[in-house]
Amino acid sequence: MIKVTAISRSFLKKGRRKERIPAVNDVSFTAIDGQITGLLGANGAGKSTTLRVIAGLLTPDSGDVAVDELMLSTSGEAIKTRLGFMPHNPGIYPRLTARENIEYFARLSGLDKALARQRTQELIDLLGMQAFAERRTEGFSQGQKTKVALSRALVHKPKNLILDEPSNGLDVMATRSLRRLLMRLRDQGHCILISSHIMQEVTAMCDKVAIIHRGQVVIDDTISGIHQTTGQDNFENAFVVAIGESLEEPQ
Amino acid sequence: MIHPLSAILVVLAKELLDNIRDRRSLFYSLIYGTLFLPCMVFGPMIFQINKQTSSYESGRDLYVVGAQLAPNLLNYLTSENFNIKHAGADYAHQVETHAYDLVLEISDDYGDALLNGTPARVTLHYLSETSDSQSHSRHLEHVLHAYNQKIAMQRMLARGLDQGMLMPLDVTLSDLSDENFGSSMLASMLAFVITFSCTMGGFYLAVDVVAGERERNSIEPLLSLAISRSQILLGKFLAILTFCTVSYAAALLMSAAMMAFMPEHIFGFGDVSNLTTYTKLMILFWPLCLLLASAMLLITTYAKSAKEAQTLLGVAMMVPMLPLLVIQFLDIEASPSQLATPVLSQYFLLDRIMMDSTHPVLAMLPGALSTTVVSLILLGIALRLFGRDKMLS
């Protein structure tokens, strides 16, 4: 379970004047086990910053995050063992093979050599990477890169999974395959938190959605709850209403 | 969670493998700096010196026209390591076509002129356009000049005159310096080769391990793992240090192998191809290697992109060369404080060890300590920078 409580984070503005720009402000929501929670928002809304704070990559100015029973402010390193994080960009090593990329993360996650090898093979089989597992990742398609990055996030069998726009750049078949995998993990009891700006993806996959707008969570509910609160049948319209915009098309 | 030491070693192993697979990086670290550079710096010098000296020692062919007219002169030339050969009538053509380096022509009236006490003419035919012919002719000119003086002295003696009358000054050279120009020059060249190779060894790896990771966004998933940032950075630092060490050690060994071809008497010292000398130089330069590796790590951690890291490293790699230039231009003598100054200390001691391989190892200690301290400070700053949130692109 991931419980985010009133986190705020600002960044220093470039230039002479030392102004700070708030990226997220007083963000709170909960992602529970056995569910896929979506963090939905437009580009620049604060989704990635929120996920980076949860993953322990950015220190919040205020607020805290609880992962299972551990608090980020006091058990930052221990929390990381329970999290699997896949950032927006896969960031894989081009001169290493897919297998070496996964094994590297497995070893750094504390698995011994034999276990790292075994776990890597399991993921190669699970995600259907046999055809390119021994190839250096330079020149991989976006789908292949995402599979390698997802394997790295899953290699230490984390209870909680954070995926920043996981279907970014994937074709239809790869997206469907990813969706099936995440649903399977959810059914196994994992807590999955994904960020997205694609309505279709969120409605197809998420049990619960937190809509974030200009650094603040404006609504945190189930899909049907959001429809009900906003009074909209169409989820895209519900999103527009939730962020306080007009449904009328601009002239 | 992984043991901290294991984490450092896993990062080190990955960085080494990654860098070995990068052909550009491998070329600059293990071939350019270590093999090409010593060859380019020492090769032409050794070739020229050997060319000049070996011919004097082993004897050079001298083609003579009219050899039968001057038997004593030819005996003298033979004693001076010339192999006398008779030149044919087409000697001028042979010189022009480079078949002969040099031809000594003895005039027909050589014997009569000597008897009458008038100048006996000998002509040197050579080609000023070729260095071999020119140096050969200059050497022969010196030898003939000595023969000239010898005959003049004999004539004075035969007439009852003291030869000292023609030599009012008795000039004696007495060099009291504890170093010589030749060894200093070689030491400077070697210092340049070692420092440059060491820097080139870690250059591309340094660019790649932090700035490169930031640029290709691989730093983000790496930092999300349950290991401390200092473990990650130390693993990367050890990878840079390994490449720097391999590069400078290989460059030093290559230079040592090349020095074996250097005629020792040319520079007036005997420790230039001595194994002890190079073992000591290996120890002497390791702290400098440590310093360069930590400086490179600091720069790549500071840079926002691989391009910026490359630019900054390109400028920074000149910094360790500056003390070398200062020593050369200002002709500074080593004081105790300078022998405890990072970089300066290594350059001064390199000169001394090349002059005398028995120079005490303990003399390296102050410089090694100060260099290590500065390295650790730079490493500390790099660790601090790496801990910032700004490390995420």
Image: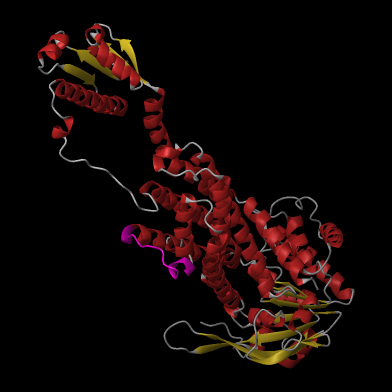
Taking depth in this image into account, of B183 and A230 the one nearest to the observer is B183
Q: Is residue B181 visible?
A: yes
Q: Quadrant of residue A17?
A: bottom left
Q: Quadrant of residue B19?
A: bottom right
- Start and end of the magenta stretch? B329-341
**Residue under the point 46% across and 50% down:** B355
Q: Is residue B286 magenta?
A: no
Q: Is residue B351 above or below residue A63?
A: above
Percent across and percent down for residue A244 are 62, 91
Taking depth in this image into account, of A110 and B330 the one nearest to the observer is B330
Percent across and percent down for residue B13 are 71, 58
Taking depth in this image into account, of A154 and B189 the one nearest to the observer is B189
Location of the C terminus of chain B (image quadrant): bottom right
Location of the N terminus of chain B (image quadrant): bottom right
**Residue under the point 71% across and 68% down:** A167
**Residue under the point 13% across and 27% down:** B161
